[in-house]
Image (cartoon, rainbow, N blue to C red):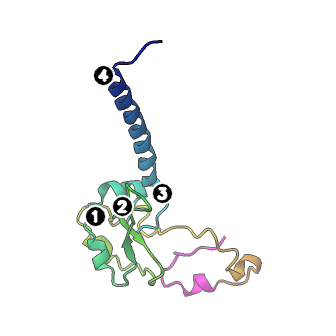
Amino acid sequence: METISRRGFLAAGAVGAAMVGVGGFGAVTRQADAAFVRPPGAESNARLTAACNRCQRCLQACPYGIITPVPLADSLVAYGTPTLAFEQGCCDFCMKCVDACPTGALSYGGAHERDLGVALVVKDACVAWDWSGCTVCKDECPVEGAITLD
């Protein structure tokens, strides 16, 4: 039986810790693409996370107070970047958040400038799911073309 030296033991421990660290870093960086509902003008979650300096000027500029920072518990990488919380109200696309953004993380003219997300779970709460004659949500939405029915 061969004995391991103190130096060998410490080297093996350092290599093991580095391997765990690299694996943990990979898991953390995958969170950047998590599905957060972003303010208007965000091109993608990954681009916003990279470009945002977490100054929170967009939060201060929002007249409805629906822009909130991503909590640390939800994502280590996206922590502090803006996300929308519709419990407080709605977004009328006033674009004040885009005007307040100093880094271009929120910007005008992108392909997804007015895409806030896609409603996926509406079948339990939507009358139109079973009865195709209802278009109230589409008719009442103040932003033309924001809601489409298929």
Q: How many angstroms separate mark 2 from mark 3 (CA)? A: 11 Å
Q: In the displayed image of the protein, which residue is found farthest to the top?
A: 1
Q: Is residue 143 left or right of residue 122?
A: left
Q: Earlier in the sequence, mark 4 or mark 1?
A: 4
Residue 143 in the image, given as x and y percentages of width and height? 48, 80
Q: How many angstroms separate mark 1 from mark 3 (CA)? A: 17 Å
Residue range highlighted in magenta? 136-150
* Disc assigned to residue 79: 2
Foreground pick, 118 / 10: 10
Nearer the observer, disc 2 or disc 3?
A: 2
**Badge 2, how many Cα within 10 Å: few under 14, some, many 20+?**
some
Residue type (three-letter) at the residue carrying disc 1: Arg
Occupied quadrant, residue 48: bottom left
- Residue ID for mark 4: 7
Q: Is residue 123 left or right of residue 108?
A: right
Residue lying at 31% horizontally and 61% vertically, measured from the top left:
105
- Please say whether residue 40 is visible from this viewpoint: no
Q: Earlier in the sequence, mark 1 or mark 3?
A: 3
Residue type (three-letter) at the residue carrying disc 4: Arg
At numbered mark 4, what does the secondary structure look like: helix, strand or loop?
Answer: helix
Residue lying at 41% horizontally and 16% vertically, measured from the top left:
3
Residue type (three-letter) at the residue carrying disc 2: Tyr
Residue 116 in the image: above or below residue 28: below
* Disc assigned to residue 34: 3
Residue lying at 33% horizontally and 54% vertically, measured from the top left:
50
Residue 3 in the image: above or below residue 23: above
* Disc assigned to residue 54: 1
- Marks 1 and 2: in contact by CB < 8 Å? yes
